[in-house]
Amino acid sequence: MRLEWLEYFITTAHVGSISAAAERHKVTRPAVSTALKKLEQEVGRELFRTGRAGVTLTAEGMQVLERAQQVMAIIDDMRVGTAEETVCFVVDSQSSLVQYLNETIVTPFKALHPNIHVTLRPVYIGDAADEFRHGSKISVVLDGKEARVLERVRQFGCETVRLGMVTRKMFLGAGHRLAGKAVLDAEDLQGEYIAYYSGGQNHISGRYAPYFAGEYRLADMEDVLSLAVRNEAVVILPELTVRCARLVRKGALVEKDIPFPGIEKTAPIHAVRVPHLSSAEELFWEYLIANFPKKP
């Protein structure tokens, strides 16, 4: 049995497509297909069934997947033990939290483990669960309840850990006509626009749109904040958003409480993981759980 057979098998199981697995490993589709057939012959079991949506694991395939992941985790552990070798992996998170996680978790983790390189990849909250079907192993998600992220990832056998609660705040440009008002109410904002990071997809901040005169959906967070700084729109973001905090300190934005009744202003933030991680990923997971700041 060859290691690449197991690697191709694990990837195909996660992405549900032989072609996608081949692309990820930068080999041809026949190479992956042949490896899977040889693996089935060696273990003496049918591992996949083919359907319109791609390939899915058989009951026997699920058992083999668990063992294959354990084997690869041991191999990864041996690789981590080589100090000269750098281990790289990706962690998913929402765009508004990436910079905060970089500063509070990734940077100090890197100082402790210089041979482990962690890259934070921004994902839409609505896509967070689906990413676990395409190879993601760790994610930090905000407001998983409303996007049904936690419910969906648990169907994939993922573990979830609650890291804490986050409060959303409203940010206005320092020169906005409402910036000097101590307490805002819903009527104050009926003639204003709200801007939020969306990229054309539905976003959790969009639920506030009915309270405003209109909305701007933007694919770049800098553009979202620029509209607020120019007093052209209001922004509602988690208090953990580092760029908002910096703009408040610089005097470019002011922070206000959200005035809309009946809307929950706090949200849980969760860490999500697949059952089997490499040793490097396990180290990062344990560090994340133990060191995630409870307050911004």
Image (cartoon, helix red, strand yellow):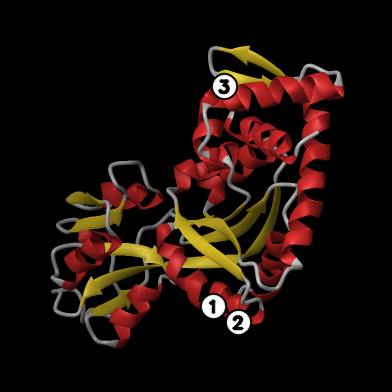
The kind of residue tagged 1 is: Thr
| Count of marks overlaid on the render | 3
Q: Nearer the viewer, residue 17 or 221?
A: 17
Q: CA distance from mark 2 to mark 1?
A: 6 Å
Position of residue 57 in the picture relative to residue 254 (left or right): right
The kind of residue tagged 2 is: Ala
Q: Tag 1, which secondary structure?
A: helix
Is 291 rendered above or below residue 204?
Answer: below
Proximity of marks 3 and 1: CB atoms separated by less than 8 Å = no
Is 204 rendered above or below residue 96?
Answer: above
Q: Nearer the viewer, residue 156 or 65?
A: 65
Pinpoint residue 70: horizontal percent, then vertical percent: 81, 46
Can residue 219 be seen here? The reply is: yes
Position of residue 65 in the picture relative to residue 193 (left or right): right
Which quarter of the figure is the N terminus placed in? top right
Can residue 240 be seen here? The reply is: no
Which of the labelled discs sits on residue 107, or is there none? 1
Q: Earlier in the sequence, mark 3 or mark 1?
A: 3
Q: Tag 3, which secondary structure?
A: helix
Name which residue lies at 71% across and 33% down: 5
The kind of residue tagged 3 is: Pro
Kindly identify which residue carries mark 3: 30
Circle nearer the viewer, 2 or 3: 3
Mark 3 neighbour class, 10 Å CA radius: few under 14, some 14 to 19, many 20 or more? few
Kindly identify which residue carries mark 2: 111
Pinpoint residue 15: horizontal percent, then vertical percent: 58, 33
Proximity of marks 2 and 1: CB atoms separated by less than 8 Å = yes
